[in-house]
Structures are given as C-alpha cells and as structure tokens.
Image (cartoon, grey):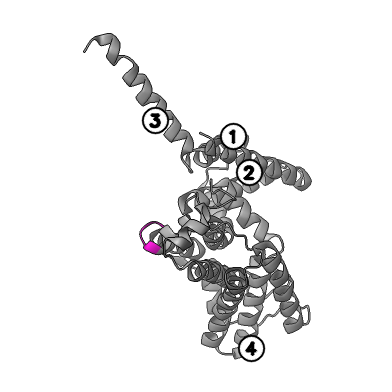
Amino acid sequence: MSSSETRPVPAALKSLRFAALRRSTILYPLAGLVVVCLVMVFASDSFLSTSNITNILRQVSINALIAVGMTFVILTGGIDLSVGAVMALAGTLAAGLMSHGGSAALGLLACIGAGVGFGAANGAFVAIARMPPIIVTLATMGIARGLALIYTGGYPVSGLPDWIGFFGSGTVLSVQMPIVMMVMVYLIGWVLLERTPFGRYVFAIGGNETATRLSGVRVVRAKLMVYVISGLTTAIAAIVLTGRLMSGQPNAGNGFELDAIAAVVLGGTSIAGGRGSLIGTLIGALLLGVLNNGLNMVGVDPYVQNVIKGGIILLAIYIGRDRRSV
C-alpha cells in the first residue's frame, strides 16, 4: 500500500477522537469549573484557602444531594419540582418529633418516610397514571409546602437535641459530615446508575421509552423507583439542613428545585433524558457553588448574580444541544 493511501487514516482517527471528546458529558462542565476557579483565584487571594474550600463543599452538599435524585429523574425524561417543598416538610416533621426530648429514631424515620412517600406518589402519578411530570410535581410541591406550614403553624420548630447538629456541622476524620454524606450518596448513586441493570434501564427509558417497554423492561417500576430515589436523597438533604440550622423551617428549600435542575443540566445531562452522568452532576453542583462563593467574595450584586447564573445555564443547554448533533 502506498504512503498516499495511508495518509487519511490518522486524520480520520483524529476527527473521530475529537467528535468523541465533544460528545463527552463531563468535558464542558469540567472545563467550565476550571475556568471559573482560575478567574476566582485571580479575583480573590483567599479563594484557595482551606477554610474557603471547605465552606464551598459544605454549602454545595445540600444541593448536590438533591441533584443525585434529580439526575435519575431527568435521565428518564422527567422532572421533579417538589424537592424543595418536600425537603421542608421532611425537615419540619423530623424537628417536631425530636424537639424537647422527643424520639430521635421516630424523627429520622418520619423524615425519610416523608421523602420516600412523596417520591412514590410522584412516581405513581407519572408512571402508572401517566400524568405529565411537571404538572404532578408542581401539584405535590404545593401540597408538601402547605403541609409543612400547617404542621408548624408557619413557625420554625426549635428545641432539637444537640447531636442532630452533627449531620450539619460535625466532622469525621477532620472532614465535615455534610461532605462525607455527599460523597457516600454519590458513590452509591454512581454504582446504581453505572453498574446495575436498573441504571441501564434508566438511560434506555430516557432514550426511547417505547422501545424499552417493548424490549421487556418493566418501565413503570423503573420510573417509580427514580422518583423514590429523588425523594430519598431529598430527605437526606433535609437531615443535613436541619442539623445545620438546628431547627425545622417550613419555608426552607424555596428555589432548591431550580438549583438542583441547574446542577444536573450544567453537569451535561440532557434535559430530554437518556444522556448524562452523576460525575457531571457533581461537577455542575461544584460549578454553581464556586460561582456563588466567588461572586459573593468579589462583591457582585445578588441581582446581577442571578443574571450571570441564568446566562451560564442557558449556555450549558445550548452546548448540550450542539453536542448531541455531533
């Protein structure tokens, strides 16, 4: 074979590698995180301090925990707008049952039960009744918020035992407990999504639900499970928030659903489903956290911050759309 016939091969390989790189779900989020970190390093001398990095990770933990379940939901082509309100309800139930010498075990069980219960209800309406996820979770968002306000009378619940603060600000081997819980949940979620048949079903449903159903997959059960997972991770986030605030706040979690969706989308997960990763979601949550922290450190007006974050989310969606066409 002549040398002229072999010349196109390296170029073709390079083209394929470049296309594969562009299709990567974590390349752009990771690049964005690196760029934002570099900008903040030059903008503030204290950005890279140990205390500030720890503070960023601790602040990110709650949104990152909620975003784990949100990733599962969005990968199936769904959405869960109820997570912020469910977190408030779960937190107030736990606080109410634990306050003033109440049962700690019962409080924690009520917290987990509220999250899983609302997740199961969302999943039943979406998967069994085949109602639109955005409508279902918008309705359950109102129900959960209303129940939290009814239960507390609109006032915070205080008088919690000191040990609950361990979940919000305690340390394990000098690492803050919210960070430890975040890492553990992501590891479990990654194994479930990437190393089990259930994870493959989640991706398949988001890619083509009809074909997945015809192939013999129990789509209803799988979709029900992703909403239960979303409720469970929301309840875990509620435990962290309750421990941090040392109270149950019925108005907690306002806008948290949008932050979780933003983390998932910034992490490269397609809002249409079928494409994404939990590693990308974690990067997206960190990107939001670094952005919030850095903009606060340099004194950017909060209203301007909303504009900047909104623009970045739109850019992330556009890049994801462009990447799917490669």
Local crowd at mark 1 within 10 Å, few (<14), some, or many (≥20)? few
Q: Give above or below for 267 relative to 182.
A: above
> Pointer 3: what residue?
17
Distance from disc 4 to disc 1, alpha carbons, whole Å, reads 47 Å
Residue 264 visible from this viewpoint: yes
Give the magenta range. Answer: 193-197
- In the image, what residue type sits under mark 2? Gly
* The one of 85 and 77 positioned closer to us in this rendering: 77
Q: Is residue 217 left or right of residue 6?
A: right
> Pointer 4: what residue?
100
Disc 4 and disc 3 in contact, CB within 8 angstroms: no
Residue at (63%, 66%) from the top-left corner? 83
- In the image, what residue type sits under mark 4? His
- In the image, what residue type sits under mark 3? Arg
> Pointer 2: what residue?
294
Dot 3 or dot 1: first in sequence order is 3
At mark 2, the secondary structure is helix
Disc 1 and disc 2 in contact, CB within 8 angstroms: yes
Residue at (49%, 60%) from the top-left corner? 179
